[in-house]
Image (spheres, coloured by chain):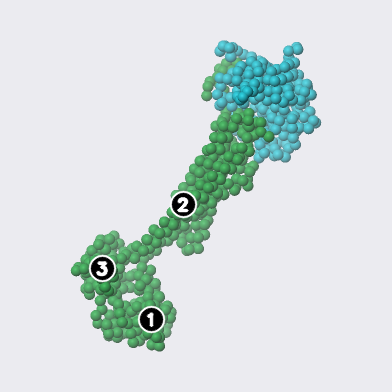
Amino acid sequence: MTVTDRHAPSRAAMALSGVTKAYEGTPPVRALRGVDLEVDDGELVSIVGPSGSGKSTLLHIMGTLDRATGGVVRVAGYDVAALGDADLSAIRSQHIGFVFQQFFLLAGETALDNVADGLLYTGMRLAVRRDLARDALDKVGLAARADHMATKLSGGERQRVAIARALIGNPRIVLADEPTGNLDSASGASIVRLLEALNEEGTTIVVITHDRLIADQFPRQVAILDGQIEKDSLWQR
Amino acid sequence: MATLTSNAAPHEVIAPSRMTPADTLRAAGIGLRTRRLRSVLSALGIMIGIGAMVAVLGLSESSKSDLLAQLDRLGTNMLHVQAGSGIGLGPGTLPDDAPAMVARIGPVDEVSAVSDVSDARVYKNDLVPSGQSGGLSVLATDDNLLATLQGSMTAGVFLDLASPDYPVVVLGSVAAERLGVRDLDQPTRVWIGGEWFTVVGIMSSLELSPDLDRAALVTPTAAAMYLGTDDLVPSTIYVRTDPASVDDVRGVMAATVNPENPDQVEVTRPSDALEARDAAESALTNLFLGLGAVALLVGGVGIANVMVISVLERRGEIGLRRALGATRRHISVQFLGESLLLAGIGGVGGVLLGAAVTAGYASLQGWGVLIPTVAIVGGLAAALLIGAIAGLYPAMRAARVSPTEALRTL
């Protein structure tokens, strides 16, 4: 790959080519064995696979939380292999939104402040972040719960707060790791509908799940098994 | 920070992750807000350590200021001259003309001498058995004694205002108490050496010359006339000098008093005893300061312990913050800040506690309350230093937590 290639304009919010990941040990664990995946702006993609298939490793590499052993990872146009830890943090703060199965809300803060934390590391003042957080909470239908402590919310509400936190900075891509994993089916279904609605407004979203029923609801499905992409619904088009 | 270009805007530079100072403080405080009891308990160790140190410094300073006030009042320019009583010297005496010789030393302001009336004892009346003298001495002295000692009378007058030829006596404060003489509203007599002496005055307690508190003072004339003592030799000479020349006067004193045998003269400065007491107290102060420092150290270890546990418990939060764009530095600053906050709260609490203890004890002792600035500033600085040291390792550990590991928790 040449320098010109690296800087070539692309619609891809995220592009992986030939990505491998091996963990040292005896024998070494090859979690990813050459993954090629491109997610364009505005897509809603599910990555589905059983546990141990490498989907969590894939999400961490896509989210720059972990580094690939081989191959090229480009996030929002940046080749992350060339970037140091501080630059990767900067990319996460500005271009990537995360949603986790365990929500990871801060217990001592209100829903509003948890959402405002989505922009905590951008250097924006708290008052400005709170204004934006109100809009984001409104988008996920939780405006009325803004001043409730995070611990007083139901599971579905907590996940909505977490989604609002991921959205607040208008990231290039939102990565959701089993977003319905800790929810009952009704709450899970409403979260899926929320993600679809947000995607219709233009947010690029990748959902990782082991649940094929959920994965099937999304426009594009990528199936992963033993560290390789087994099937991508894009191939059939 | 590397300058990088993105494919969307070829010359765009990634703005580094950053936090406003207000947010940094808020993040450092979140652990304290959500774990209040634990925070209070771990700050308590620092609080006790700092409180002990501030109280020790405050109390020692308050008592020292009290001592200085006492020394100021009593003066440090008083010298006592006595005959040496070392081994082989026997019962020493001072030459007759010693007081006059001393008075000739330039910077000497006042001189006064007392002589033992060795055979005489003082009793409440003539019915008291002669063995029960109550440890009181009878001394003959000149008119100038009260002025030299800068003493005062609680009742009556000193010998200078009484006729030297009559059998009159002035009692020291302890002597008056032991003889049952409280006031002189009624004419009061005491029995000395087989004669009635009229009490004309009672002296206030003399802090620098406690010997005189236990004495009955008569004039040399009365001693000769009524007690049959002709050969009075000075036993103690009291000298008040120019305050600037105390040491010089002390240096020539022995040779002046007894030019033949200067080594048989003992010169003391009674205020030295008070200063020695102060020195002994400052040795104790150092001991207590050391104990306070140990408490502080234990408090620091407590904070480090709580912080290490906190880092383990809050791996999920660390992972989240890294996902939100925190750099390792942001994470370490947050945990270091939390440790500093804990120690700072402990430090402020400790200074308040120490000040309260000092104020309480000092006012109980009737001292002025004095808390040295160095104790307050030093206490806070020590707390923050301990907090920084205690937080350093947990902060580094927090920064080193891998985000992927952290997010796998639960």
Report the residue that reaches farthest toward the right. A186
Give the chain coloured green: B
Q: Position of residue A232 (x, y in %)?
A: 73, 16
Mark before the other along the chain sequence, 2 or 1: 1
Q: What chain is tagged by disc 3? A: B
Mark before the other along the chain sequence, 3 or 2: 3
Mark before the other along the chain sequence, 3 or 1: 1
* Position above or below: B14 against B193: above
Residue B146 position by quadrant: bottom left
* Amino acid type shown at disc 3: Val
Same chain, labels 2 and 1: yes
Is B314 on the left-hand or right-hand side of B360?
right
**What residue is pinned by disc 1?**
B133
Is B408 in front, or is A88?
A: B408
Which residue is depicted at the point 48% across and 52% down? Answer: B291
Q: Position of residue B54 (x, y in %)?
A: 48, 52
**What residue is pinned by disc 3?**
B265
Q: What chain is tagged by disc 1? A: B
Display colour for chain A: cyan
Q: Are marks 2 and 1 in contact (CB under 8 Å)?
A: no
**Tag on residue B290?**
2
